[in-house]
Image: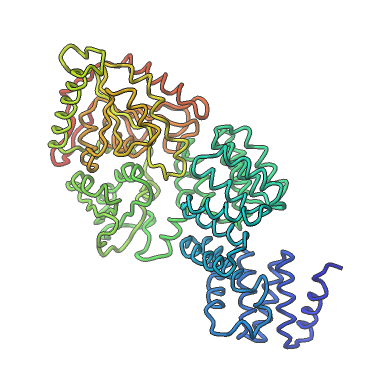
Amino acid sequence: MAPHEPVLNTGIEALRAGRGDTDALVSAGVQCLIAGDARSAAAFARAANCVDAARIATARLLGHALVALGEYADAVEVLRASLVSDRQQAEEPALQSEPLNESHSRVALGRALCATSRTNDGIVEYERAAGLEPGSAWILARLGEGLALAKRYPQALDVLNRAIAIDPQCGPAYTTLGEALIEVGRPSAALKPLERALALDTGRGAPAVALGQAFVRMGRLAESLPWFNRAVEIEPTCADAFRHLGRTLAALRADKEALDCIRAARQLRGGDWPDTWMDEAGLLLRRGDFRAGWRAYEKREFAQRLATIVPPLWNGDDSVEGESLLLIAEQGLGDTFQFIRFAPRVVALGAKVTVEVQPPLRNLLKRCFAHTGVDIIARGDAQPAATRQNSLVGMPFALQADPSTYASEVPYVFADDSRTALWQERLDAHWRASKHAGTGTGTGTGTGTPRLRVGIVASGNPLFRNDADRSMPLAECAPLFAQHDIQWVVVQPELRERDRATLAVHPSVWWTGNALQDFDDTAGLLASLDLVISVDTGVAHLSGAMGRPVWVLLPYFGDWRWLHDRDDSPWYPSARLFRQPQPQDWRSVIAAVQTALDSMAKPDNTAVRSVPNGAAANAPT
């Protein structure tokens, strides 16, 4: 007989007899919870609540059970109520020990809050629990998990190392430490703690899943597959294992198997997991199945949340004529540049359209779209009284846009003439100064100007989840900088420490630095260049939206918007794509770029580079 069975039998007898033995019911529920039977624990908690609704212990038991069952929203409500009660814990012996004591209940509440996208609130509860039990490695491990979820990685790493120092056998702390190291771009450093976690954190697939992710981040995709499979062996219902196995198979172009795994992961989570809908959408869009891809994309978390609030969502199912539509820039700067092209199409349907964009983009886009009837506001500005709303990236689905027309509006972003003239003067002055200083050995075109003026963007926002894949060290561009008849300009307001040494070796390369005051400045500089060579960043999208020649450098498994196996883009006619032939292989990409540059003639710079006041114009050739 299992140790908990006598208590469990007592609870069952109390239920059958209809006795008001609340203590027996709570004890039985706790034993079920400890044994992993959350459904029975919830049943005992509800039965005890019918007997005595004033008991805090029954509420906490139910809250813990709901967390274990994944019913997080209900768990938050129940646990919060149980933790603000005026009742003294001394009156209820069950509240003096695990798992119903205050510290464990606050951890359970923290888990539920984090699972419902209220991570900062969850961290507060973890911190309160840690304050009650400062020597608990288990609680610190949960706190570290919450901090990592909030991307507060330095704090998370510190807390997790403290947990391990307190208890070197705390498997969950090693698991979360490894996961955090992967997220900060140190996958090789994650291997040792994750191997330790695999030995300690038994019964869970999480350490093996994280080991697989570490190998993915190191570009060793094939080596990651056994770890995801190992996670499934350890924990057959590990949804994360199926999800990441599917994502990796997609990167290896095994689309059918990838889709099967992603859908299996979703089923294990009850049939609706927004992250897996994003995975499925990415897989479908990447292979050009736009119709099914956009449909799956509309099931992401942000779209589901929009559908539950006012004003009502407009997704193309009815007429928008006469409506006031608010479109929200949901994602990054590049996404805003990419999808704002659709806003004038909604105006053409008879709607009054306002687009809320990131503050750095407001002035540029307000000027460029003034003639289209689209109003631009910044996030944080007072919103107009809208009758309908949607995300900006939801417009291809709402409009049922034909992919062959995605680029019909290009160019739709334009530089200001005065900014362009200013940057042309700066470029000329810098070229003359570099020649005078002897930092270049070429002779240009013989007219005192470079053969080409080329912008370089080697890295984007370091906080971007997949930055380690999409960004590259500036040193990879060293073979390009040897072409001294080209004026090289690093178009980044910030420079990573690793890249400063590269500029010291190549003093003729101009880093614009804080000369780029805003995106109007960036647009003016791009309009003054012959070509932009960029990793997948907002600058690449801005160049494409302006119709400027842009070469986009892509990782082996690029973002869905660049599709598979093609060197052009349905979004930007002026873009040319250069892809890694193997993971992390930037050298081959740069070699291909170098060959292409060698055959590139000096453009005819009499072509229009910018358009006054954002008026419509043809894209430069």
Q: Position of residue 444 (x, y in %)?
A: 22, 14
User: Taking 389 as reference, is 89 above or below it?
Assistant: below
User: Taking 63 as reference, is 52 above or below it?
Assistant: below
Q: Position of residue 46 (x, y in %)?
A: 66, 78
- Judge from the rendering whether residue 461 lies leftward or rightward of residue 82; answer left or right: left
Colour scheme of the picture: rainbow
The quarter of the displayed image where residue 213 is located: top right
Quadrant the N terminus occupies: bottom right
Q: Position of residue 40 (x, y in %)?
A: 71, 71
Residue 368: in sight, yes or no? yes
Quadrant the C terminus occupies: top left
Q: Position of residue 618 (x, y in %)?
A: 21, 32
- Judge from the rendering whether residue 535 lies leftward or rightward of residue 89; answer left or right: left
What residue occupies the far right of the structure in this picture?
1
Which residue is rendered at x = 31% and y = 16% of the image? 483
User: Taking 79 as reference, is 395 above or below it?
Assistant: above
Residue 236: in sight, yes or no? no
Which residue is rendered at x = 63% and y = 51% of the image? 239
User: Taking 556 as reference, is 315 above or below it?
Assistant: below
- Judge from the rendering whether residue 524 lies leftward or rightward of residue 550; answer left or right: left
- Judge from the rendering whether residue 507 lies leftward or rightward of residue 560; answer left or right: left
The quarter of the displayed image where residue 79 is located: bottom right
The quarter of the displayed image where residue 590 is located: top left
Number of numbered discs visible in the structure rendering:
0
